Amino acid sequence: MTKKKIILIGCGEHARMVIDNLEDQGLYELFGLTTHTAEELDKKVCGYTVVCKDEDIPRLISENPDIAGYVLGVGNMQVRHRLYTVLDPMLAAVNIIHPSSMISKRATLGTGNLIEAFTKIANGAKIGNHCILNSFSAVNHDQILGDNVLIAGNVSMAGRKIGSHTIIADGASIGFKKSVGAHCIVGDGAVVTKDLPDHVIAYGNPARIVRKNGSFDV
């Protein structure tokens, strides 16, 4: 079976992580990577070539009609949002799902998501678009993740909803039927025992709001 060709947007640390999962998934052929700076053009990343700047992606697609999709290889949430807002109308975002992850057939996934090894997504969960779920994290049943959400490693979630553009850092725990708003950061090892509103940063056990968090134009 011929694999569909896709491009990886970005060529830094997060891009390398995406490549590992993409190769293990085995569904797509990586045409190349993109960059925001001319200095990185033509460099090799894990054996793949940086083929164009982000601004030249429309030209790349027009010259290579066999490119069928893309995935983000950028970790910054604001940059991710800016990129997928431009790219989604012109190219299909694909899900990169490691074969060792466990995803219920009754869960719902959007597009452009990265689901790493040993991640669990349970029955009735709904994952938005362009989310990152790192290894050894679990999304319990009937939970909702918005768009552009980062769930770091070893996160346990028994909550209700995580808003868009929110980061749940390594080892955090979201308590039973608790929700976290949009544009939030829940710090490493934090234990969320009550709902958190939009635009806050929370740390500790139990998690306490330490300050407001800014947002970007959406």
Image (cartoon, rainbow, N blue to C red):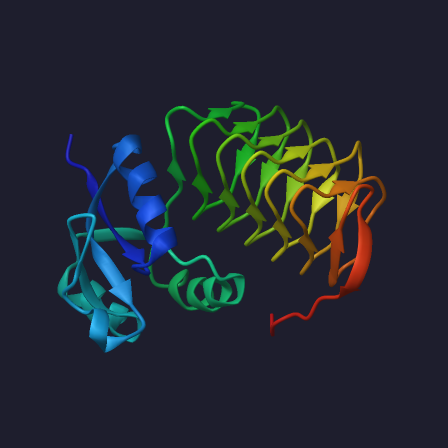
Pinpoint residue 114: horizontal percent, then vertical percent: 43, 43
In this image, 93 relative to 122: left or right? left
Q: Can residue 72 be seen by looking at this rendering?
A: no
Residue at image location 73% in from the left, 38% down from the top: 174
Out of 175 and 189, give the one closest to the viewer: 189
Out of 149 and 3, give the one closest to the viewer: 149
108 lies above or below 87? above
Q: Quadrant of residue 115?
A: top left
Pinpoint residue 48: horizontal percent, then vertical percent: 17, 52
Q: Which image quarter is the C terminus in?
A: bottom right
133 lies above or below 1? below
Residue at image location 15% in from the left, 30% down from the top: 1
Pinpoint residue 198: horizontal percent, then vertical percent: 76, 60
Q: Quadrant of residue 17?
A: top left
59 lies above or below 49? below
In this image, 113 relative to 128: left or right? left
Residue at image location 72% in from the left, 43% down from the top: 190
Q: Can residue 130 be seen by looking at this rendering?
A: yes
Out of 216 and 209, give the one closest to the viewer: 209
214 lies above or below 140? below
Single out the residue that lies furthest toward the right.
194
